[in-house]
Image (cartoon, rainbow, N blue to C red):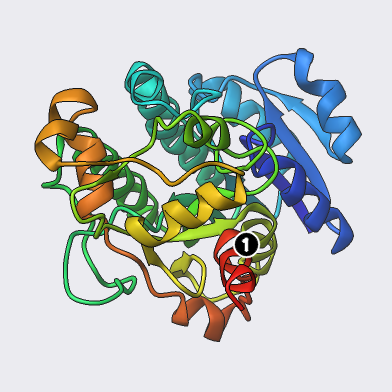
């Protein structure tokens, strides 16, 4: 198949393009400037220059390539995961996702492109009993930042589901971990944990769903031929913050994370941090395992913790 990947230079870009190339696909990467051409060529993809915020530019690029499918991995996220950097990037990230989604959908419809795969969220489901299936609503009434993000994903998916004559697949990824992501032991979150910047808040009952970046890439390739719809692309064992965070700290060579009350965390790191730690809901991957043959690897720091106690 001939494929166009928007957001090809993001965290998932390199493993995704490798997976697609290994499956025999011809891959084009949509980039804003020629400065990214070398990186894409190194990955094995051909660069196509277009500004995703410019509808005419996107339309011209897609008309020229006429791909069989478009994979939308657009983001504009900061290099480091901190509350301040996330807040600063929020408006820009939303604009890129929403406008890029609208422009891609309009252009693919005009060019007769049928299959559309979109990066969505498997960790912002509304609180409820048990793991969330794809039928559960997003957390649009959560803390301010979480609610805004959840509404963005609702808007993205709704626009695609409303677009006629396309086969739409929403891949609701868990938190990415692994190379070039925030959740690595070598830097970023690893550094923050070693510096005791990431506490267990309250009872740490928020349930987190992760997915290794390579597993996310493989599932995206599988989504080229699955039935349209939404799929949770998450690990097999979503775990509470009080479970995964100490295990991650040990894997990073850090001491046990500090513990703070919800009241103290509200004052120092804000309502979103408290929500993540105390109210986040894990997601079920049963549909993806059944229909995409999704087989995620065990969450590596929980495996390390288990082997260390055996």
Residue pointed to by mark 1: 300
Whether 241 is drawn above or below 87: the answer is: below
Q: Nearer the viewer, residue 103 or 248?
A: 248
User: In the figure, is residue 103 to the left or right of 153?
Assistant: right
Q: Residue furthest bottom?
A: 290
Q: Nearer the viewer, residue 92 or 308?
A: 308
User: In the figure, is residue 268 to the left or right of 310?
Assistant: left
Q: Position of residue 18 (x, y in %)?
A: 82, 51
Quadrant of the rendered structure where residue 8 is? top right
Q: Nearer the viewer, residue 122 or 300?
A: 300
Q: Position of residue 238 (x, y in %)?
A: 41, 68
Residue 18 is at least partly visible in this image:
yes
Q: Quadrant of the N terminus?
A: bottom right
Q: Position of residue 28 (x, y in %)?
A: 77, 39
Q: Quadrant of the C terminus?
A: bottom right
Label 1 element class: helix
Binning the other alpha carbons within 10 Å of mark 1 as few (below 14), some (14 to 19) or many (20 upward) gives some
Q: Residue at x 24, y 60 (%)?
A: 205
Q: Residue at x 63, y 64 (%)?
A: 304
Residue 114 is at least partly visible in this image:
no
User: In the figure, is residue 251 to the left or right of 16?
Assistant: left
Q: Nearer the viewer, residue 279 or 228?
A: 279
Quadrant of the rendered structure where residue 225 is? bottom right
Q: Residue at x 61, y 39 (%)?
A: 181
Whether 80 is drawn above or below 106: the answer is: above
User: In the figure, is residue 293 to the left or right of 231?
Assistant: right
Q: Position of residue 237 (x, y in %)?
A: 46, 73
Q: Residue at x 19, y 29 (%)?
A: 270
């Amino acid at each position: 198949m001939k494929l166009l990947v928007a957001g090809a230079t993001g965290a998932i870009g390199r493993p995704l393009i490798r997976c697609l190339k290994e499956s025999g696909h011809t891959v084009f990467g949509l980039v804003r400037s020629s400065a990214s051409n070398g990186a894409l060529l190194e990955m094995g993809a051909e660069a196509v220059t277009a500004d995703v915020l410019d509808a005419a530019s996107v339309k011209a690029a897609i008309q020229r390539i006429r791909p069989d499918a478009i994979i939308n991995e657009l983001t504009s996220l900061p290099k480091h995961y901190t509350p301040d950097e996330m807040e600063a990037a929020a408006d820009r990230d939303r604009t890129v996702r929403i406008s890029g989604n609208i422009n891609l959908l309009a252009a693919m419809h005009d060019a007769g492109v049928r299959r559309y795969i979109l990066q969505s969220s498997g960790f912002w489901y509304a609180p409820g009993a048990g793991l969330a299936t794809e039928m559960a609503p997003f957390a649009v009434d959560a803390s301010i930042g979480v609610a805004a993000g959840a509404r963005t994903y609702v808007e993205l998916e709704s626009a695609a589901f409303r677009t006629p004559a396309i086969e739409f697949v929403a891949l609701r990824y868990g938190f990415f971990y692994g190379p070039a992501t925030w959740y690595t032991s070598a830097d970023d979150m690893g550094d923050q944990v070693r510096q005791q910047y990431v506490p267990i808040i309250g009872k740490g009952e928020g349930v987190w769903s992760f997915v290794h970046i390579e597993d996310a890439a493989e599932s995206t390739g599988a989504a080229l031929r699955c039935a349209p719809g939404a799929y949770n692309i998450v690990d097999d064992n979503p775990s509470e913050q009080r479970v995964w965070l100490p295990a991650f700290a040990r894997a990073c060579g850090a001491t046990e994370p500090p513990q703070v009350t919800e009241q103290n965390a509200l004052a120092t790191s804000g309502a979103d941090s408290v929500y993540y730690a105390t109210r986040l809901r894990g997601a079920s991957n049963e549909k993806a395992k059944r229909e995409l043959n999704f087989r995620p690897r065990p969450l590596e720091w929980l495996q390390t913790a288990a082997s260390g106690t055996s």
